[in-house]
């Protein structure tokens, strides 16, 4: 099976879906001629033409609005937000229109739009190129949200998102783009939305998270296994909305010691909901207080390197927390 | 990361203390220490205390062994800590097309620091020993595991879910449990549950004396620091204070009925058991108010009478007896006293008493009835003036008027400093305690 980069997995998912279904098209800032600022849409305009790889003005509300309209008219748009930080002008379209159309029209209309947005820091991008906006959209019924951590899941989830009959936010981690490579089958497959995945089996502690921080957790887990004999059970949520309740409960009850990690800030983050689900269902399986390691509750990612390093999760921070929990 | 060796010194545990004895080490060289993690237990004249680590790092060397008396400010161990060196700033990576790389590893000092499992897994004094998580309780209940026999490998000796699973698998700690703890009316003085393997002596140097006639027929146990302190205080008390002794018999029938009537509601409302001790303390306080000389200290050329009534409570543990203090006991209701007794007994059992919990006592009460004693000769808690015991409450046929009735009777024994007190005042004091105790009845208010 070929090993490809995370970004390549996203690109091939779009390419294959555009080949499969003529209604699928991409739109966004610089996605056409340039092929995206990260190169995610490279080659799509050459292959599918200007009408299906559409360069748009610098207006996220317009990108989302056009995509939503096209979706309601029966097309399958993939709207790209260049950075998720720029997504907020489109929040009204996404939350008040896309998320509500099916409900509001009593099933007469639907909105099968995919909105892709790169999240996360660690690229010295500072406050407008590093944000994790998951929690802004997380509490909105009617939206699906996915955030893959591997190339395999990136491809499979993007295909599932494109084929989904309702709006899906696809949060790809920009730090994963070229850092993460793994085996991705050449044949067509989808990763179902709403299903988590066990990345690592273990019996001492359970780590639950999504996106880039899971890779730090995996590195920390290997070191802890080697050095301390601590075996971590690691669950990749993959889908944030809907959350995989049964997957979360199964992983949590496996050890009774739960550490939830994400880069988005702690207060009101996905981890709070995961912790609440566990607290609601699993009181008698808990062996330690549920813990969270998340980004700090500060307004933005600092641009200075030491500040950014302090803000971000890393292997050592997670290792210390994991060991502490294991020894609790 | 620069490694650095840091000394941990003996802290000044209280103003008056100039040294302390290391009772035992909780950590060994090679163990990782987290900030504030207990590294050893200290003994002073008054109290046991855990010494928390002041740094995060690896214990490399112990400089003072268990049993040694160490002066305040003297280093007791060496710890290797990690300090972040001024790392060169990472190269800024382009934002867009360029590849991004993982940040240089490690930003937090001692990332892999915390917490080695406590060595004494069955130590009932470990701070987290009796904190059971829901998972532990459920597993223990479902599988009939006696948690008092499960070794705790978690932080602070906590029994983890895995410890219970291991115990189930190995079949240890399954019923029948050893003798259940007797439900004594005076929980305050009940020693900790005996359901554990006998602990090795604190300073495990046992010399077998084979020099004499019967080789191997006797052995010596080194005196632990706490035993030494007890011995010193007891000797000082009996040699300096001329003890006199007296006893009265008290009819507690009404109080027994009152307690039976109230105890279930009390447990429900207050969350603790209603014992006889708070009633006795109430009575003692009332009598001291009338005869304040009982609350005094002999100072050779004068007698110092204390206005504050701070009752010391003798609380036994497995290997010692401690006397934590209820301050201003005269300002408390029976319920308030019950809570204080419960709290002090708990702290004593868990080894959490602070020096401040032990100081300032002016009169001591001991519930010797717990051990089934009906008569005892207590030694005064130096330098106080008197000590009273509550013996076991027993039902006896008693002559009342010209009839014989079955009554709940108890003996109160009083040892007093005959330099300060004489028979008459002690007799009156004793009678007053008796009068108050016998006066408790159906109308007594606990609040």
Image (cartoon, rainbow, N blue to C red):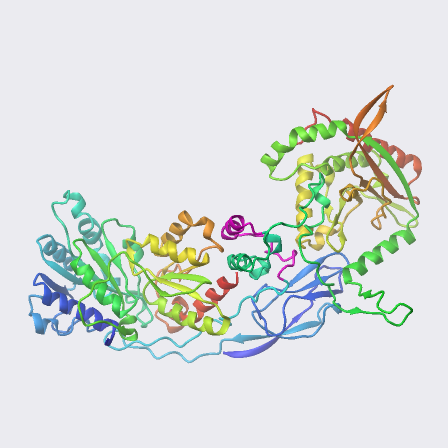
Residue A316: in sight, yes or no? yes
Q: Is residue B78 toward the left or the right of residue A251 in the image?
A: right
Residue stretch rendered in magenta on the structure: B121-145
Residue at screen point 21% across, 73% down: A8
Query: Where is the N terminus of chain A found, in terms of image quarters?
Result: bottom left
Picture coordinates of residue A104, whole percent (x, y): 17, 43
Give the left or right position of residue B347, taking residue A149 as reference.
right
Q: Is residue A104 above or below residue B199?
A: above
The spot of residue A213 in percent (x, y) is 36, 66
Q: Residue visible at 68% across and 28% down?
A: B445
> Is residue A302 in sight in this rendering?
no
Image location of residue A134, percent across then percent down? 29, 58
Dominant secondary-structure state across the stretch colored magenta? loop
Q: Quadrant of residue A241?
A: bottom left
Q: Judge from the rendering whether residue B51 lies leftward or rightward of residue A173; answer left or right.
A: right
Q: Is residue B266 magenta?
A: no
């Amino acid at each position: 099976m070929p090993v490809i980069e995370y970004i390549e997995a996203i690109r091939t998912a779009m390419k294959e879906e555009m080949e499969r279904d003529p209604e699928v098209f991409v739109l966004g800032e610089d996605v056409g001629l340039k092929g995206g600022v990260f190169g995610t849409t490279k080659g799509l305009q050459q292959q599918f033409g200007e009408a299906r790889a559409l360069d748009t003005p610098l207006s996220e509300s317009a990108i989302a609005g056009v995509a939503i309209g096209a979706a309601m008219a029966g097309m399958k748009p993939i709207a790209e937000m260049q950075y998720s930080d720029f997504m907020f002008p489109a929040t009204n379209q996404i939350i008040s229109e896309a998320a509500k159309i099916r409900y509001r029209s009593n099933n007469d209309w639907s909105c099968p739009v995919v909105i892709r947005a790169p999240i996360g820091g660690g690229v010295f991008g500072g406050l407008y190129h590093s944000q994790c906006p998951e929690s802004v959209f997380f509490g909105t019924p009617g939206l699906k949200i996915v955030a893959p951590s591997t190339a395999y899941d990136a491809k499979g989830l993007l295909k599932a998102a494109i084929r989904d009959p309702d709006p899906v936010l696809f949060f790809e981690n920009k730090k994963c783009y070229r850092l993460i490579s793994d085996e991705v089958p050449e044949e067509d497959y989808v990763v179902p939305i709403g299903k988590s995945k066990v990345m690592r089996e273990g019996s001492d502690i359970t780590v639950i998270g999504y996106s880039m921080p899971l890779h730090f957790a995996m590195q920390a887990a290997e070191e802890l296994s080697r050095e301390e004999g601590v075996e971590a059970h690691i669950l990749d949520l993959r889908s944030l909305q809907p959350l995989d309740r049964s997957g979360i409960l199964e992983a949590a009850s496996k050890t009774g010691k739960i550490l939830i990690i994400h880069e988005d800030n702690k207060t009101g983050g996905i981890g709070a909901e995961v912790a609440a689900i566990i607290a609601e269902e699993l009181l008698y399986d808990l062996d330690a207080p549920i813990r969270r390691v998340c980004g700090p509750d500060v307004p933005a990612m600092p641009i200075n390197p030491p500040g950014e390093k302090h803000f971000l999760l890393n292997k050592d921070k997670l290792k210390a927390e994991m060991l502490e929990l294991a020894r609790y | 990361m620069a490694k650095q060796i840091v000394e941990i010194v003996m802290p000044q545990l209280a103003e008056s203390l100039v040294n302390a004895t290391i009772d035992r080490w909780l950590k060994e060289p090679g163990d990782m220490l987290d900030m504030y993690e207990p590294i050893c237990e200290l003994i002073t004249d008054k109290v046991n205390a855990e010494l928390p680590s002041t740094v995060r790092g690896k214990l490399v060397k112990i400089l003072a062994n268990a049993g040694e008396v160490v002066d305040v400010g003297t280093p007791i161990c060496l710890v290797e800590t990690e300090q972040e060196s001024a790392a060169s700033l990472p190269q800024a990576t382009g934002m867009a097309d360029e590849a991004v790389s993982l940040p240089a590893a490690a930003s937090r000092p001692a990332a892999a620091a915390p917490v080695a499992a406590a060595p004494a897994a069955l130590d009932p004094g470990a701070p987290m020993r009796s904190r059971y998580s829901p998972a532990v309780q459920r597993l223990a209940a479902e599988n009939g595991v006696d948690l008092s026999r499960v070794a705790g490998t978690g932080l602070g000796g906590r029994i983890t879910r895995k410890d219970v699973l291991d115990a189930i698998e190995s079949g240890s700690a399954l019923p029948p449990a050893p003798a259940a703890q007797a439900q004594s009316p005076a929980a305050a003085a009940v020693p900790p549950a005996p359901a554990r393997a006998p602990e090795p002596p604190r300073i495990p140097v046992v010399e077998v004396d084979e020099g004499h006639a019967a080789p191997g027929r006797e052995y010596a146990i080194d005196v632990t620091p706490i035993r030494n302190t007890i011995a010193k205080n007891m000797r000082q008390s009996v040699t300096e204070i001329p003890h006199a002794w007296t006893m009265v018999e008290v009819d507690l029938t009404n109080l027994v009925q009152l307690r039976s009537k109230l105890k279930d509601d009390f447990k429900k409302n207050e969350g603790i058991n209603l014992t006889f001790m708070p009633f006795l303390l109430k009575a003692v306080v009332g009598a001291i108010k009338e005869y304040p000389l009982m609350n005094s200290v002999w100072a050779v050329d004068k007698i110092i009478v204390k206005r504050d009534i701070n009752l010391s409570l003798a609380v036994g543990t497995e290997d010692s007896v401690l006397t934590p203090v209820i301050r201003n006991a005269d300002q408390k209701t029976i319920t308030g006293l019950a809570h204080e007794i419960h709290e002090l007994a708990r702290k004593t059992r868990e080894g959490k008493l602070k020096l401040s919990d032990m100081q300032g006592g002016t009169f001591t009460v001991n519930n010797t009835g717990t051990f089934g004693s009906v008569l005892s000769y207590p030694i005064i808690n130096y330098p106080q003036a008197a000590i009273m015991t509550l013996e076991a409450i027993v039902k006896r046929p008693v002559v009342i008027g010209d009839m014989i009735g079955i009554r709940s009777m108890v003996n109160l024994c009083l040892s007093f400093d005959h330099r300060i007190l004489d028979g008459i005042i002690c007799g009156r004091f004793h009678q007053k305690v008796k009068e108050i105790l016998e006066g408790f009845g159906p109308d007594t208010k606990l609040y």
